[in-house]
Image: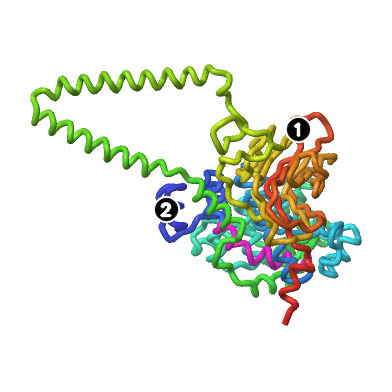
Amino acid sequence: MEGSSMQLLLGSRPSQQPLSDAAVMIALRKGRIEFFRHLYRRHYAAVQAYASQCVRGPLHAQEVTSDVFAHLLQQMVSGESLIERRHPGCLRPQLLGKVRTAAIHRWHRERDTLAPDFQAWVAAGSRWPWGEDGQLALAYERLPATTQCLLWHSVVERDDPAFTARITGLDHHAVPAACDQAMTALRQARADLYFERLERPDCRDVIERLIKRPHADPAEGWGHLRACPACAALYKDLSQLDEQLEAQLPVRLLGWWTGQGYLRAKAAIPIPLGDPPFLARLLERGRADAPAEPSRVRRTTAVTRRSRGSRGRSRAASPQSPRRSRAAFAVAGFLVGAGAGVLLLTACDPQFGASVEPPHAPGPSPAPSDPPSQQATPPPAVSARFPVQANAYTSQRGTSAGSNPGSRALGGSSVLRYYRVDFSTVRDTLAVARLSGPSGGGARLELRLDSPVRPPLAQIVPSADGSVNDISVPITPVVGVHRLYVTAHCPTTTDRCVELFAFGAAPSMSEALLPLQRP
C-alpha cells in the first residue's frame, strides 16, 4: 500500500520504501484520509507511553491518546497548518506536546486523573527547567526540518534505523551516516551561537579545529582553553553533545520528560493492527457518501452503444429508416424544448423558491417546530449516544458548513433539527459536544427536546481559547425517541460564533467502569 501510493505522489521510487511522515501528510491534504493509519501506527506507542507518564491508568491514557490523534486528523483534513514555532520539523515532539497540553487541561476538570509526579509538576507552575543548557535547544531549532527529525528519532527516542528511515523517508542503510552528518551540523550550530558573542579571533580558530575533530586530544589548544573558561566550557559541551542531546533536548522542548520511564513504556506498547474508531467512522461515512456516478456512466455508455448498433441494423434492414430517424429526432427535440420550458417557468415562479431543508413529502417545507407531515415516511431513528455527527441533521436554518467536513457553524438565530433521536437504549447522565467557540468566550450551545422554545436540556460552553474540545455537562436521563433542536447563543451580533462537530449523550465515568468492576 505504502510503496505504490508513494510512487503516485512522489514519482518513481523503490516500491519497498514507505512514505515518510511528510509525504503522508501531503497525501492527507489531498483527500487520502486512509493514509492517516500510517501516522497512527507509527506514533501510537510513543503517544500512549507519554500519556501514561502524565495521567493515571491505561483508561485515561487511552482517552488522551485518542483525543490527540483525532485532533491531528481534524487539523490535516481542515487544512490547518501543523507548523509550530517550536520543533516544526518533526511530528513526534508535536504530538507529545499535545499530550502534555491535554493533560494540563485536566488539572481544572479532573485533577485526580493526573499521575502524581505530573500533578506535582503542574502544581508547581509547569515550569520549564531553565537551568539546563538553553543554547543546545536554540542550536537544534536552527537546523533544517529533516535534520531535526533525524536527531530526535535516532538520539532522543533511540528508534532503530529501519523505523527512523520510515519516518524520515531515507533508505535505512543511509540512516547511520545521515545521523553522523546531523550531529556534525548540530555541533556547528552550537558553536555558531558561541561565535556570535566572540570578540577574539583566536577563540574562533581553536573552536573550529575542535569541531572538525570533536574526540581528538585537545593538547594543541590546551593553553587557550586554560586561559579562556568560555571556550573550555564550549569544548566540554561539544565533546559531550550526544549525552546532552538525549538528556536535555526533550526537557527543553517539552518541559515534562521522564526519560527512561517513557522509553520503557513505549517499548512495552504493541503497535495497533486496526484503525482507531474515529478514523473507521470517517472512512465508513466517506464510503457511504461516495456517489455511484462511475456505474451510471458505464451503464449509460453500454445503452448508448446498444442503441447505436440497433439503429445501424435498422438502417440496413429498411430503406425508410433515414426518414423515420429524422422524425424521431424532431420529436425528441420538441420534448427536450418542452421540458426546458417547464423548468424555466418553475424557476421563475416564486412559489418554487429554494427551501432551506428538503421536504420529506410534496408540499412546502414545515418550520423547524412544526410536526412532520402524516403522509411522509419517517426517517430512521438516530441513536443519541455520542458522537452524533453535526451534519446528520434532518433540517437546518441559518447554519453553514464549518471548517471541517461534517461540522456546522451556528449563529444566534441558527437551528439544527434532528427529527428522531433515540434515547431509549442509553439513559445517559452526560451531554457531550465536540465544539469550538470564539476566542474570549461568551458563547454557548443549547440542546432542546421536542421544541426550539422549550427550556434547554443542556447548555454547553466551549473553551474560551477558541480550540476544539469535547465538553460534557450533566443532564437528567432521557427516555424515548425525541426531536432534538440545537441552537447557539453568541456574545455579539457576529454571524457565526460556535462550530459544532458532534454531540450526544454519554455515561459518566463511574457508570462506564461498572461493567469492568463486576466479577
Residue nearer the viewer, 119 or 150: 119
Image-based side of 387 in relation to 289, left or right: right
The secondary structure type at the circle numbered 1 is loop
Q: Amino acid at mark 1?
A: Ser
Residue nearer the viewer, 177 or 379: 379
Q: Magenta includes 43? A: yes
The residue under label 2 is: 13
The residue under label 1 is: 413
The secondary structure type at the circle numbered 2 is loop
Q: Earlier in the sequence, mark 1 or mark 2?
A: 2
Image-based side of 421 in relation to 236, left or right: left
Residue 159 can be seen in this image: yes
Span of residues in magenta = 37-55
Q: Position of residue 258 (x, y in %)?
A: 77, 68
Q: CA distance from mark 1 to mark 2?
A: 54 Å
Q: Main secondary structure of the magenta part?
A: helix
Q: Residue at x 73, y 56 (%)?
A: 505
Q: Amino acid at mark 2?
A: Arg
